[in-house]
Image (cartoon, helix red, strand yellow):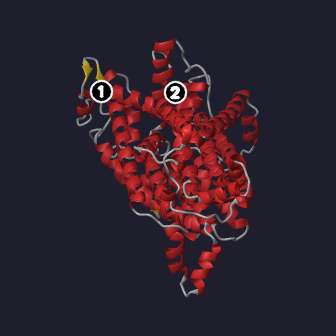
Amino acid sequence: MALPVAFFGVFFAWPVVSIVDRGLRPDGAWRFGRIGETLSRPDILDVLGFTVWQALASTGLTLLVALPGAYVFARFDFPGKSMLRAVVTVPFVLPTVLVGTAFLALVGRGGLTDELWGLRLDTSVWAILLAHVFFNYAVVVRTVGGLWSQLDPRQEEAARVLGASRWTAWRTVTLPALVPAVAAAALMVFLFTFTSFGVVQILGGDAYSTLEAEIYRQTARLLDLPTAAVLTLVQFVAVGAILAVHARTVRRRETALRLVAPERTARRPRGAGQWALLAGVLVSVALLILLPLGVLVERSFAGPDGYGLRYYRALGSLDESGTFLVPPLEAIGNSLRYAVAATAIAVLIGGLAAAALTRRAGRLVRGFDALLMLPLGVSAVTVGFGFLITLDEPPLDLRASWILVPLAQALVGVPFVVRTMLPVLRAVDERLREAAAVLGASPWRAWREVDLPLVRRALLIAAGFAFAVSLGEFGATVFIARPDSPTLPVAVARLLGRPGELNYGQAMALSTILMVVCAVSLLLLERLRTDRTSGEF
């Protein structure tokens, strides 16, 4: 636990505490009365109420839509499965600003639904909820499906041999085993929607605002750091309470499971019902995932004189406005370098943390489990500003260093590594480790020979998630990325923030490149993890 604790202490707790300190103690004296004053304001209460409501609604809707997809990807084998699994993960790495823009093109004024049926959803909360499902679909599919594909189906078959119906066997055997993974996925979706910013900014307009959007407004627009500090504390306390309840309740449900290689659980659909389920999932993916992505791709080629590569060619040169110090195309290489470094950091820190959390060490470890998830629930705006304030003098003067961006991105990647690896690590039968020790294996060799083969697939999934999150991280990166080294999301946001048809087209072109890079990376990951089989355990 030493290295993860030090990492979170220096690069998360210190920056956040510094921001709160400056907001509530501007002249050296604490002003706690500002907490009550802020929380009694009707506009702030409305923001808090809407933030909680839309997060709960988004989480429930995402589980309802994505759990059938998790089952299909875990249990069915069909042509194009690896490609489709990579495609459904692409939305998760898109900057939330782009997610909102894509859905605005679909359901807003002049959008697809407006042209076909005269239906506009941009003035309702449904656009926000659908965009959140689009963004978080992969979280449920990959987190729940990753464990589901390794559950031995013979355990459920044994229950049916003993007289249980198909529903009873699934409810009493498979469902309890899936509860930790489902809870972990629901937790991540809730935290992401609880701190939603870009989607709400574009689709909500002046009618809807979340806590994250309000923190940004108070900090960047109104320069009201005390109000922003109070809202940051509220967000911190709320997320901390949620994570504490999760760690206490879900931990009791995690048990040793019989795991097998995922290749042995997937098969072609059988019967009309399973084919109908597969068709339904494919249709939902086409409408909810592919259609918004298709809109972005189409707009990257559609110019005033017809379709062409005009916007892509413009990415290789500087404009006269001085918005970029380097051609926007260089953001591709920057993003890949940052993402690789952030993935390495996240896998190291998250892997050590997950290994520590599998040991029964009392309340301290359970509290650390909740602490690891806090970066998902604390404003990225706060973290970004905190980096600028705290990491600007020796011994940690990193403001001019390239490593600052991967460190910020790794903060968001570590929770995904932990939540992906932890259910599988805790499912490993302790007797396997004990048997290895009895046979003379050292602790390191026992982990290498027993744990690693079982969690290899989960480790690859975790690395893929960390890489994807790093590619699309925007909230903190926008404050700390150097002007001569922008990432893809930062470059896209800069282009979207400027008027003009050329800037908008270049933003769509960069977004398409980001989607392609992500899809290729995830497809390679799929091939890598299925090249070798782990055998049966």
Residue at image position (46%, 32%) is 286
Image quadrant in which the N terminus is located: bottom right
Residue at image position (37%, 23%) is 499
Q: Amino acid at mark 1?
A: Phe
Residue 508 figure quarter: top left
Say left or right for 136 vs 340. Answer: right
**Residue 197 in sight from this viewpoint:** no
Residue indicated by mark 1: 301
Q: Secondary structure at mark 1?
A: helix
Q: Is residue 158 above or below residue 293?
A: below
Name the N-terminal-most of marks 1 and 2.
2
Q: Residues within 10 Å of mark 1 (few under 14, many from 20)?
A: many
Residue 162 figure quarter: bottom right
Between 470 and 498, the one nearer to me in the picture: 470
Residue at image position (37%, 38%) is 491
Q: Which label belongs to residue 56?
A: none
Q: Is residue 290 above or below residue 22?
A: above
Say left or right for 230 vs 320. Answer: right
Residue indicated by mark 2: 202
Camera-near label (1 vs 2) is 1
Q: How many marks?
A: 2
Between 463 and 29, the one nearer to me in the picture: 463
Q: Residue furthest bottom?
A: 440
Residue 213 figure quarter: top right
Residue at image position (51%, 35%) is 279
Q: Residues within 10 Å of mark 2 (few under 14, many from 20)?
A: many
Q: Secondary structure at mark 2?
A: helix
